[in-house]
Image: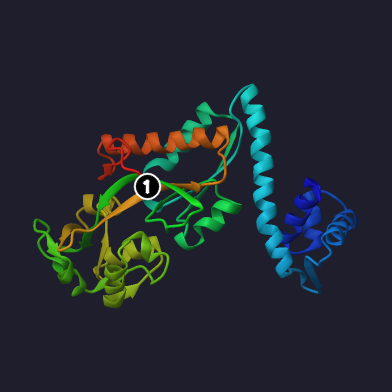
Amino acid sequence: MNERQLRYFATIYEEGAMARAARRARVAVSALSHHLNNLEAELETSLFVRTRKGMQPTAAGRSLYDRATEILKLLSSAADDVRSAAGQVAGDVSVGMAHSAVKVVAIDLLKRIAAGYPNVRLSLTESLPNSTLVSALSSEIDLAIVYNPPSNPRLKTEAILEEQMMCIGQPQIIGDEEEAIAFDEVLELPLIAPRAGPWARILLDDESLLKRVETAAKFQLNSVRTTIDAVCAGLGATINTRHYFAEQIGHGTVCARPITDPEITRKLHLCELADQPPSFAIEAVRRLVTDLIDSAIQEGRWDAVGLQRLGVEGR
């Protein structure tokens, strides 16, 4: 088994058809088939079922793909690091980022990389589900900036900031914005919340409170834009942060009331795989992200408490 075989195998897996894989790999179909046959012979198992609709991976094929992507990432990272040690920082870096972070730092991050790291190629994914976090970090994401990540021994997490959760809605629905509102009162409102499951975890890390919100919700929406539009249209209230609705609050479309009994907060974490050494490029992007978030808090562009300065550790 060699790197070329693994790359060809991964390409077939991702494309699902020999012809498309051959075009992407820029080799003849016969050459691609030859390498696949040799790989299957070496492993003494079939990696795909050949059908009229394409190449369907077997259980062995799915297992190998997970390992192959990890190996190929490490090989690419090693090559980039050797080049970086000899000169400029270079390589591919993929970042998964929560919507709130994208709003504040994404454009500045692109500008900083374009100006200071011309040989770094950045891929940015918005709103990475917590349920697929470990899988994504294993295969396609190098750094994840997410809320309330799951506890997992394979994850290394660092708490970056903490935000207070608010009751957001039009005044005629949520009442006087100058006063706090009890959590039990929030549940009596026409509530708009994420659909039960991994998306809901970004709001609340407390399972008991989260279940109460899910039970009380009149509408369950897993769309950022639709949630904002529904709240602005007066269809209900939601639990979120001032930062998330900053534009709408600034325009007076909606208002925010602090939630008490209990007070609810959420933490933004920077996540990586614990057993995957970062490349120079990944380290450079990590520094940029944390510096930009810290600057946004210090300048008042993000209503949150920075945890790095306070020395708060992640899980």
Q: Nearer the viewer, residue 272 or 243?
A: 272
Residue depicted at x 45% and y 60%:
130
Relative image position of residue 132 (x, y in whole percent): 51, 61
Whether residue 297 sits left or right of residue 12 in the image: it is: left
Relative image position of residue 227 (x, y in whole percent): 34, 65
Q: Is residue 286 above or below residue 23?
A: above
The residue singled out by tag 1 in the image is 314
Asked whether residue 95 appears in the rendered view, the answer is no
Relative image position of residue 173 (x, y in whole percent): 17, 69
Residue depicted at x 14% and y 67%:
172
- Please tell me in which quadrant of the rendered image residue 43 appears: bottom right
Q: Amino acid at mark 1?
A: Gly
Asked whether residue 205 appears in the rendered view, the answer is yes
Whether residue 252 sits left or right of residue 179 in the image: it is: right
Q: How is the image coloured?
A: rainbow
Residue density around tag 1, few if under 14, some if 14–19, many if 20 or more, within 10 Å: some
At numbered mark 1, what does the secondary structure look like: helix, strand or loop?
Answer: loop
Residue depicted at x 32% and y 68%:
207
Q: Is residue 108 above or below residue 218?
A: above
- Please tell me in which quadrant of the rendered image residue 90 appears: top right
Residue at the farthest front position? 153
Relative image position of residue 232 (x, y in whole percent): 27, 63
Q: Is residue 218 above or below residue 223?
A: below
